[in-house]
Amino acid sequence: MTVEPMTSREVDAFRERGDAFTRDLMQEYYDHFAGLKDELEIERIYEEYEDLTTLDTARSLEHAPTELWRFACEGFLGNLTRAHQARVAQVETELKATVDGEEIPYRMLRVVTANEADRDRRERLDRERIRLLDEHLNPVYLEASAIDREAVQRLDAPNYYELYKGFGFRLDELAEECRALLDETEKLWEREGDRLFRERLGLSLSEARPWDVGRLLRAPELDRLYPSGGMVPALEATLGDLGIDLRSQANVHLDLEVRPNKTPRAFCAPIEVPGKVMLVIQPIGGKDDWEALFHEAGHTEHYGNTSETLSMEGKRLGDMAVTEGWAMLMQHLVTEPAWLGRRLDVPRVDDLAHEGAVSLLFFVRRYAAKLLYEIEFFQADEPTTMRNRYAEILSDALKLPLYPETYLDDIDGSFYVTGYLRSWAFEAQLRDFLRAEFGNEWFARRDAGDLLRELWSVGQEPTADALLKDVTGARLEMAAVADRVREHL
């Protein structure tokens, strides 16, 4: 059945309702993951805004700006699986593991495993997490996947992969760049990954298993260099050098309270852009926590400095590689030698920069493989056939065996994996520009802060490619990430 395109007035009304819908969802996500409420009541919100998420609404926006069309299509799909999203959150909140007589909340299992020095106990903890995932969550994921696959065809796309190509996602081009990056850095990862596992855990890369990875990245021996009490002051001082007073930003709110059900990771909730942006922290300490805090602070400053005059899609939608790029720019300061010399009294800053580069190489290779897997996954006729394929692709990239059971849990919706991958390239190339313009200590220059605020003000209206080209004249390239890694190796 043919659906009439929306009029310009109807499109404006959709924008206004869409902004309110996203605001209410963000408030609900904040309340739940900040530990203020146990339930994630998104079904109620979808019901209130049901007019935004119908098939006819999506079809009527096909010729509107692409970001609005994508938003409507994602709303249509999300509405169909809203009960599954709520169910996953409920299960994760209620589920508990019992290991060696100790009861541990499901969401804390990764944290507890990463903090566990005994390797045998790490294995027991991690295997129990995977058992619970496969038994309680994978059935929900599979039901949602079946619904999505049928619904995508009602949007006149044969599958999710083709739908996102229709939105302008250059999946095949990015996949080619990722294959080249994986090939180019394979020997580098085998050498440097093996070295880091041996130094930190006394294991070779070939001996490492999934339960060792979190411990490797947790790096407890660095806790004394990255004390929990110094995290927020270091962030405030860094932003202060750029001319930003974090505490006086009326639209930015720091949630520092400790709550039992609060997620252990820092996160940013842009409830209103730019009017109400939450930076949520439950600091435990260690380099990983510092990186998470600075990462989310990058999101917070981006959303908090976005111009109020932008359209809803310019403020909230657009290319997610932009906001992830700003997050990466802040995160990577934590292992930047010049920043370490200025902000932390630590020895061997070059060693920390080296370890930071190896960690970046791990994640870039992992996400490059994830993209290749997701492209295959969303073209497969039956998702369960991809279970072993997931382990094959990811294990080959990281050179250690991974669990096939995480083949559904490890998928980022909306091909968000492309945002992460391109954000690393955006950060690497923009950082080179900032260092050329303002020096290696660009992060301590007010004029660099002025430029950042100017760039943050455009929100997500330009793509990362367009923004980078406008600022530096360069083309966004994944090869830049490999160059960035090699700088400290």
Image (spheres, grey):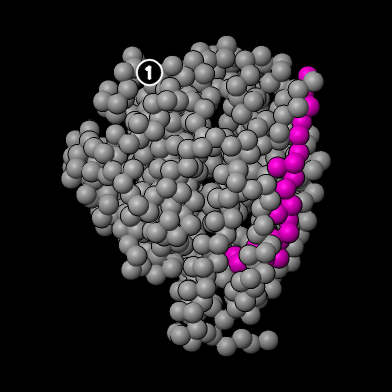
Quadrant assignment for the C terminus: top left
**Position of residue 377 in the picture relative to residue 351 (left or right):** right
Q: Position of residue 144 (x, y in %)?
A: 74, 57
* Residue 163 visible here: no
The residue located at (48%, 57%) in the rendering is: 271
Asked whether 256 falls inside the magenta stretch, the response is: no
Viewer-proximal residue, 226 or 37? 37
Viewer-proximal residue, 102 or 132? 102
Vertical comparison of 5 with 113: above or below = below
Specify the quadrant of the image occupied by residue 2.
bottom right
Q: Residues within 10 Å of mark 1 (few under 14, many from 20)?
A: some
**Position of residue 214 in the picture relative to residue 248 (left or right):** right
Please give the count of numbered marks on the rendered protein.
Answer: 1
Residue type highlighted by circle 1: Asp
The residue located at (40%, 43%) in the rendering is: 297
Q: Position of residue 340 (x, y in %)?
A: 31, 25
Provide the secondary structure element on which disc 1 rests: helix
Q: Position of residue 137 (x, y in %)?
A: 76, 45
> Which residue was labeled with disc 1?
351
Specify the quadrant of the image occupied by residue 298.
top left
Vertical comparison of 202 with 174: above or below = above
The residue located at (39%, 26%) in the rendering is: 230
Quadrant assignment for the N terminus: bottom right
Which secondary structure class fits the magenta region best?
helix
* Residue 294 visible here: yes
The residue located at (47%, 38%) in the rendering is: 256
Q: For the magenta stretch, what is the residue range?
A: 74-100
Vertical comparison of 191 with 376: above or below = above
Q: Position of residue 11 (x, y in %)?
A: 48, 80
